[in-house]
Image (cartoon, rainbow, N blue to C red):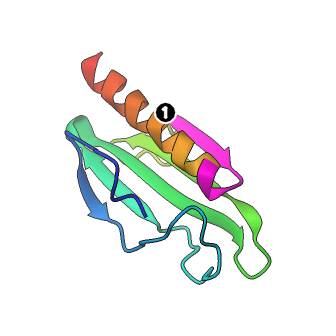
């Protein structure tokens, strides 16, 4: 699902899904654990679905955390569709890279 992204200098540690943004026929893959990328300086980019998959009532969330501080994310945005999620990925990746440069 996220194969077309360059996460450099990060390393994908979890990415089991391969789905097109136009294919919502198999919703069994929706879960809080969709993608995780580990970056230098203990930054983590995390993507998940929060809601009910059976009814598609929920949102995708992208988090950026540092040093495992999930209670205080540096970035936390919600997206209602896969297309929006993909746009959000570009923003989140740029955010992590900016954090690494600062």
Q: Is residue 76 magenta?
A: yes
Q: Is residue 21 left or right of residue 65?
A: right
Q: Residue at x 30, y 15 (%)?
A: 102
Q: Is residue 32 magenta?
A: no
Q: Taking the image as drawn, is residue 71 in sight?
A: no
Q: Residue at x 42, y 42 (%)?
A: 65
The residue where tag 1 is placed is 91
Q: Residue at x 51, y 39 (%)?
A: 73
Q: Taking the image as drawn, is residue 66 in sight?
A: yes
Q: How far from the left and from the top, in percent, is residue 17?
A: 42, 72
Q: How far from the left and from the top, in percent, is residue 46?
A: 44, 53
> Which image quadrant: the N terminus?
bottom left
Identify which residue, 31 or 69, lies in the foreground: 31
Magenta region: 75-83
Q: Is residue 75 left or right of residue 8?
A: right
Q: Residue at x 52, y 36 (%)?
A: 75
């Amino acid at each position: 699902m996220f194969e077309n992204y360059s996460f450099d200098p990060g390393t994908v540690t979890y990415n089991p899904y391969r789905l097109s943004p136009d294919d919502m026929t198999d919703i069994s893959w929706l879960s809080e654990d969709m993608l995780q990328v580990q970056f230098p300086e203990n930054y983590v980019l995390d993507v998940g679905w929060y809601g009910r998959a059976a009814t598609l009532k929920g949102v995708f969330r992208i988090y950026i955390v540092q040093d495992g501080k999930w209670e205080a994310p540096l970035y936390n945005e919600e997206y209602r569709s896969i297309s929006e999620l993909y746009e959000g990925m570009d923003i989140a990746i740029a955010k992590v890279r900016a954090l690494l440069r600062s």
